[in-house]
Amino acid sequence: MEEEVLGKAYDGRLMRRLLTYIQPYKLEVLFALIFLFINAALQVLGPLLTKLAVDRYLAPTGRTATTVLDPVLSNNPWTGLGEISFLYLLAIIGGMLCDFAEQYLMQWVGQKAMFDLRRQLMGHLQRLDLTYYDHNPVGRLVTRITSDVDALNELFSSGLLMILGDLLMLSFVLAAMFKLSPGMTGLLLAVMPLVILVTIQFRRAVQNSYRRIRVAIARINSYLQEHINGISVLQLFNREAKSRGEFERINRDHMEAFKDAITAYGWFYPVIEFFAMLALALLLAYGGFRIRSGALTLGVLVAFFQYGQRFFRPIQDLSEKYNILQAAMAASERVFKVIDTEPGIQAPAVPTPFPAGPAAIEFDGVWFAYKDEDWVLRDVSFTIEPGETIAVVGHTGAGKTTLTSLLLRFYEIQRGVIRIGGIDIREFDLEALRRNFGVVLQDPHLFTGTIASNIRLGTAGISDQHLAESAERVNLLDFVRTLPEGFEQPVRERGSGFSTGQKQLISFARALTHNPRYLILDEATSSVDTETEFRIREALGRLVEGRTSIVIAHRLSTIQRADRILVMHKGKLRELGTHQELLAMRGIYWKLYQLQYKDQEFAGAETVSGD
């Protein structure tokens, strides 16, 4: 719904902040302003040269006012007309060159400023904690960096300076006309109330259409993203026709909004053109009468006709620039709202160095809720000794993954403390803290690039040999050798084309290559087949050697060799011990084990009966 909100056409606070992005390029802006000023002056010069040609050579009256060009112009009509034509040509060429230079400079400045703004936005988004992303859809954030920034670019490149140029043009034209004939200038201005009224109506119509267009585009993007990602479900349940019907309604809203905008533009320019012609007709009648009475020269009337055309064109442009300005103000409001959002998790001003040697991890009375006091963790306390492998099990929603998210400070705890080496993790620099952890998630994420770049993730100093050794230790190397380009095999978006097990092995290699002191495995084998699970389990044994490890798993077969097992239930740590100790307790862990054992028996029986 926020896409429907329209801000003010001009907000001084936002504009001052936007201008800070072009401040580093103020020299280029200064030159653009100079070229703009010269161009506006040259536009005024043309009609004055026409007046001079008519009054001096084409229809001389003997009453022509003295000009600065009189000493240099020839008395011969043909020579004088040639000289004036040459000066007119120079004015046209000069205006063209100034217009090009001004447009080029402002487009350059706009692109540079938007490059800086996008870079700032991306850097800021990377600093925000996960709580922010829990409440802000990805599509909305992508829109901030793309469409909203593009709206600001349009303001810088063809908005601000063009508005100033149009105002300069109007000022110069009015000054020149008033100097030539105050009466005819007043006659031309008499139609201005009608022009202003039409412009206001046009602005309202287009403003509403643009609002609907932005809303429709946002809905189209959202619908496409959701339904393209879920295309397999659509096809599976034969929902293609229904989906096309829904998209047609959204697409039609966009078309209707555009049709209204086209209609508004369709009547606005002809109406303004009509008033311009009406003004020129009045000038012709009034000017003809004044010429017959000897109070006006033909050259002045011709010059006024040219000025009339120059007078109404900026008014048309200003109406369009108003929409650009308003869209930019709304876009800047949304962009700055993102930039002004402070990360909820901050690194200390003077961070404590991360422990150099073996250090235990301690959860001491930790309470956490994602929202208000809907507690996900309740008074959780335990210690993981250096080099120890701890497994965490429990039902879905028991708080298993939350433990690791808090340990890595993706979220901040409400009560209690988490320590590493006896030091509160809030005293560490975030980068230093996370650098010591390797994480393998249930749904491995691969970036577009190559297998090698996905394992290195931009870390310098990882040699090809070290890459191959890590891949071999996690049973990935055999698969890589079957690929045509080996480690340089291209990886498409989200690892499309690789199986879940292959992507998981790449994630294991990524974790091992960076040689972390602490390892977190979050449901790393839950989505793979049995054969791949055995390969991953073997790789897991190599991966945890000499490291403090936390293994989260639903499959109890993968964690039986853990030094200790934590059993989470409804946000509390209910049981703690080895596999055999927990079975002997005949508590929650024993029930989980029995359930899985029965499921395996049932699955095996079905397989036998099916065979």
Image (tube, helix red, strand yellow):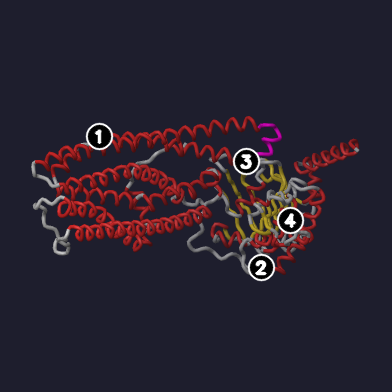
Whole-Å distance between the Cαs marked 4 and 1?
73 Å
Whole-Å distance between the Cαs marked 1 and 2?
72 Å
Nearest to the observer: residue 156 or residue 453: 156
92 sits to left or right of 440: left
In the rendered structure, which disc, 4 or 2, sits on the residue that comes first in sequence? Answer: 2
Is residue 386 visible in this depiction of the protein? no
Whole-Å distance between the Cαs marked 4 and 3?
27 Å
Q: At label 1, which amino acid type do we have?
A: Leu
Image mark for residue 10: none
Q: To which residue does mark 2 refer?
A: 462
Q: Secondary structure at mark 4?
A: helix
Nearest to the observer: residue 131 or residue 564: 131
Q: Secondary structure at mark 2?
A: loop
Q: Which residues are magenta?
A: 231-239
Percent of width and height locating residue 146: 49, 49
Locate the C terminus and report the quarter of the image it occupies: top right
Is residue 374 visible in this depiction of the protein? yes
Tell me the mark number nearer the camera, choosing from 3 and 1.
1
118 sits to left or right of 274: right
Image mark for residue 505: 4
252 sits to left or right of 593: left
